[in-house]
Amino acid sequence: MTMSRTGKQGPWQAVVRCWKAHPRIAQFITYFMVGNLATVVQLVLIPVLQPILGSTSLVNVDLYLFGPIGDPQTMTTVTAVGQTVSGLNPYYVFNFTGGPVNTLVTRTLNGITGSYLTHGGVAYFLATFIPLILSQVVSFFLQRKVTFKSSGNIAWQAMWYFAAFLVITVGANALYGIYQPWLYSTLGEAIGGLIAAFLQCCIAFWVFFPIMKLIFPYRKRHNHSFSTKSHRQRLKRQPESNAKAALFPGGPLGSVGRRLPLRLQESIRKNRTKIQ
């Protein structure tokens, strides 16, 4: 008895009541949790794919998309295997200079020849992009069913979801190339880098939420099913006389019966009395 009362009045039940009482807050929290789950999928797959694809010839193939943003002669200094490496590193939304990561290669880029910092080429692009797509597939289905409880056209929603994802990803990374140099020069590489990464995540997070509400409209399902079993049970509970009287709705003989000749009406009444 004590356990039953505790279960009904415990903290978990209070959380459930609060969750149901504030559906918009609950929806946003669910959106946040599903987004983090998708990020976990991405973080697990990237370190698995990087060494696999990094051992192929794709590691030496350059890939640059959307840029350069800012100064094309931007220099970056990194520490790799106990050594400090400095090289040209212009900002592109997708910047994957071919070569083993954090080494230097000679390239001519944007009319500037010099030693460029490498980022693993197409191999590391695929190692990043494949987990990103898979994480968004997981996010799409969970956000659609769990967060927004949508039942719209899945093909149409998938098209708009991934279109929005590409636009937001490219836009957030493009903005990163604008405010990142200023943060680095003002606050230093450690704190500036942390704030820049945080802003990049926040932009994508807050912009995507209202867009998802448009892509996944909530539609309350109405149950139009007809329970034949319950219908049969209701018929059984009706008196047999009522079932017979239903042959002539609108009264003892109904509107149809009242239009019959008087002798025929009397005959019908007698026969119905015998049947009952």
Image (spheres, rainbow, N blue to C red):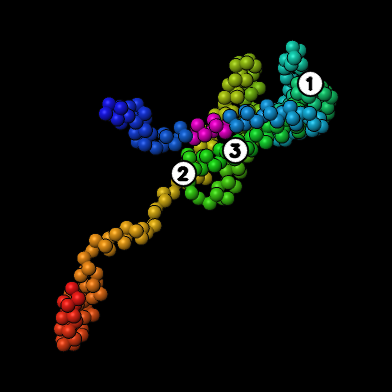
Looking at the rendered image, the disc whose residue lies closer to the viewer, 3 or 1, is 3
* Inter-mark Cα distance, 1 to 2: 48 Å
Find disc 1 in the rendering and name its residue: 103
Please name the residue shown 15% across and 81% down the image: 270
Residue 120 figure quarter: top right
Mark 3 neighbour class, 10 Å CA radius: few under 14, some 14 to 19, many 20 or more: many
* Inter-mark Cα distance, 2 to 3: 17 Å
Instruction: State which tag comes first along the sequence, 3 or 1.
Output: 1
> Which amino acid, by three-letter code, is at mark 3?
Gln
> Which amino acid, by three-letter code, is at mark 1?
Thr
Residue found at the far top of this picture = 82
The main secondary structure of the magenta stretch is: helix
What span is colored magenta in the figure?
Answer: 31-39
Q: Is residue 33 magenta?
A: yes
Find disc 3 in the rendering and name its residue: 136
**Quadrant for the C terminus in the image:** bottom left
Left or right: residue 244 versus residue 176 is left
Left or right: residue 238 versus residue 124 is left
Residue 72 in view, yes or no = no
Q: Secondary structure at mark 1?
A: loop
Q: Position of residue 84 (x, y in %)?
A: 75, 13
Please name the residue shown 60% across and 36% down the image: 135
Q: Is residue 268 above or below residue 210?
A: below
Q: Position of residue 260 (x, y in %)?
A: 20, 85
Instruction: State which tag comes first along the sequence, 1 or 2.
Output: 1
